[in-house]
Image: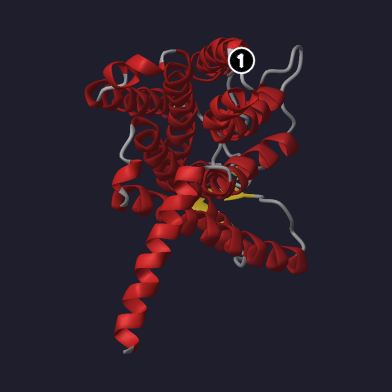
Amino acid sequence: METNNETQLHEFILLGLSSDWDSQVSLFVLFLLMYLVTVLGNFLIIVLIRLDSRLHTPMYFFLTNLSLVDASYATSIVPQLLAHFLATHKAIPFLSCAAQLFFSLGLGGIEFLLLAVMAYDRYVAVCDPLRYSVIMHAGLCTRLVITSWVSGSINSLVHTAITFQLPMCTNKYIDHIACETLAVVRLACVDTSSNKIAIMVSSIVLLMTPFFLVLLSYIQIISTILKIQSTEGRWKAFHTCASHLTMVVLCYGMAIFTYIQPHSSPSVLQEKLMSLFYAILTPMLNPMIYSLRNKEVKGAWQKLLGKFSGFASKLAT
């Protein structure tokens, strides 16, 4: 018994998605490609915004942070997931598990807060355009971003601390793809009611509160758009919010569907799908959505490619 307790303190075993070798190899190739697209796409968005002065606006400042969060979130989970696909002993050290929980939980909270901040930015742009530059000044944008990062990090630190102080006894098998809060809490051999209450409170503060702020912003935005007389004007106003609204529906929609269900809690399969959605799919779609649906970003891409082509031509001659 003592040996088991001591072993548990040093590592956990992640059961992952599948025990079939062929399935694991196929998933490794698929997720590796998706991860590379995710990191490259978000990195290019950040570089593009930095290089093009036309994109030095509050909306793209927030988008830079969102891209950084997405790439970091994917990196906190996917490399370990890929390594475990090819490993026979799918262990993760105790401290690595705690670090993974801290970063994934923190970055997830930061993303929800940033989406709420971006909704406020779109609200000001559509509902009070003449005062946009006065309201959304550099100081306010910086404070909003810092608040998002600090709030998400503090929440994650608290949850990580109260989760890993629980006695796990001899159970070290985590039925998940990563060290996720609910999956780790289930290992405890004591009453975890207080932890579940803390998770619920955190969901309300960092999920539902930003969601209602986003909802309130878009109610005002839609109300303002409907008052615009011309069809072209309404379409132009809506187009400024389309990319952000798409991300809001994806991120908040999946989280609310999974975690905010009356009289029920998410199943293990739902938790795994949720983690995959946020670790791989959402971060990969973010740069695509903002590139394909945004005129300014597409224009910046064309300008950058034009410069690159000209530089390549000079080298060739």
Q: Residues within 10 Å of mark 1 (few under 14, many from 20)?
A: few
Residue at (69% x, 61% y) in the render? 27
Residue 226 image position (x, y, % from top left)? 63, 13
Image height check: is 53 above or below 146? below
Closer-to-camera residue (263/224): 224
Residue 238 image position (x, y, % from top left)? 58, 26
Residue 133 image position (x, y, % from top left)? 30, 22
- Callout 1: helix, strand or loop? loop
Residue at (47% x, 32% y) in the render? 111
Position of the C terminus, as image quadrant, is bottom left
Residue at (58% x, 21% y) in the render? 190
Quadrant hosting residue 211: top right
Image height check: is 155 above or below 15? above
Q: Which residue type carries mark 1?
A: Gln
Closer-to-camera residue (295/155): 295
Work out whether residue 42 can be spotted: no
Closer-to-camera residue (24/299): 299
| Left or right of 116 in this view: 236 | right
Which residue corresponds to mark 1?
229
Residue 60 image position (x, y, % from top left)? 38, 38
